[in-house]
Image (cartoon, helix red, strand yellow):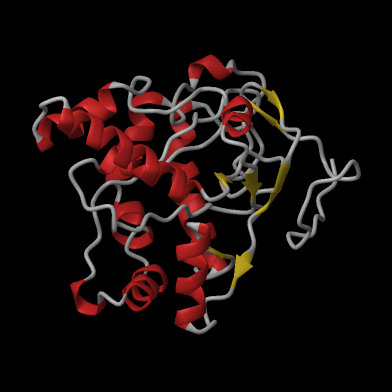
Amino acid sequence: MPHSISPTQENASSSQPKLFVNDGSLENYSWLQPSQPDEPLEELRRKYNEDGYIFLKGHIPREDVLTARRSYFDFMSPSGVLKPGTTSEQGIFDSAKSAAEFPGIGAGARALDAHKQDWYKETFCKHPALSEFISRFSGWGDDTLAIKRTLLRNNIPGTHAIVVHYDQIFLRHGEPTAITAWVPMGDIKVNGGGLIYLEKAHTLCRDQETSFYNSAISSGLTEEQAKHAFNATMMDPGLLDSAPSAYSKRFNKRWLYGQS
């Protein structure tokens, strides 16, 4: 599959790679549009409000990202996930193993323990390039707080990706003004299992939340009951759909791909 793809191309064409998700191929997709962290804040905020995201490439220094990547796979190495003779920075799966041995976020209990390591929770998650940008971008300044809720995972080749969701589902008792960041720990090609984002998903999800909330309140539920009821109507554990291609067709929206 081709590696050099221009992220400025508006529509996917037959010359671009065939991309697959959990329920088959995508017939219509486009690209996340990169922004630069030194653009005027007003312009970045406009993009964020209109598109629901800003895509910043290379904002965290590359060596800092690769250091965290090496630390992660060094930590995961005892699980047997890495191919013998390869480095932790490469992070290559041992295809002689069964992917079933490494479910969910990578390798069971050890993958969960990775979240508690200082190289991740103290150094990577609190990287000043990220926290300082968010404080300026949001206008929160010194009032900016980092929520101690993160998900650190690797994808095993040939397995299903995480299904359709949005982050407010996992921050149900927080304000919808929270800003979440997806940070790839290394280079990810477009066909390498990276992030996809449903175009204008922020308006779709806001409308869904408002509609459900109004229905719940009108039926006699309290605000607290309505919060729990919204999540209870989703797939376990709080997901929207297992079929990304069908989901995008239902709402006539494209999935937007990024490569880091």
Q: Position of residue 85 (x, y in %)?
A: 66, 37
Q: Which residue is drawn at the image coordinates 62% and 31% (left, top)? A: 93
Q: Residue furthest right?
A: 15
Q: Position of residue 209 (x, y in %)?
A: 32, 39
Q: Position of residue 35 (x, y in %)?
A: 59, 70
Q: Is residue 74 left or right of residue 223?
A: right
Q: Which residue is drawn at the image coordinates 74% and 39% (left, top)? A: 28
Q: Is residue 64 left or right of residue 151?
A: right
> Taking the image as drawn, is residue 190 in sight?
no
Q: Residue furthest front?
A: 218
Above or below residue 212? Residue 121 is: below
Above or below residue 175? Residue 239 is: above
Q: How many marks?
A: 0
Q: Which residue is drawn at the image coordinates 45% and 27% (left, top)? A: 79
Looking at the figure, which quarter contains the C terminus?
A: bottom right
Q: Which residue is drawn at the image coordinates 61% and 25% (left, top)? A: 246
Above or below residue 97? Residue 187 is: below
Q: Position of residue 187 (x, y in %)?
A: 64, 53
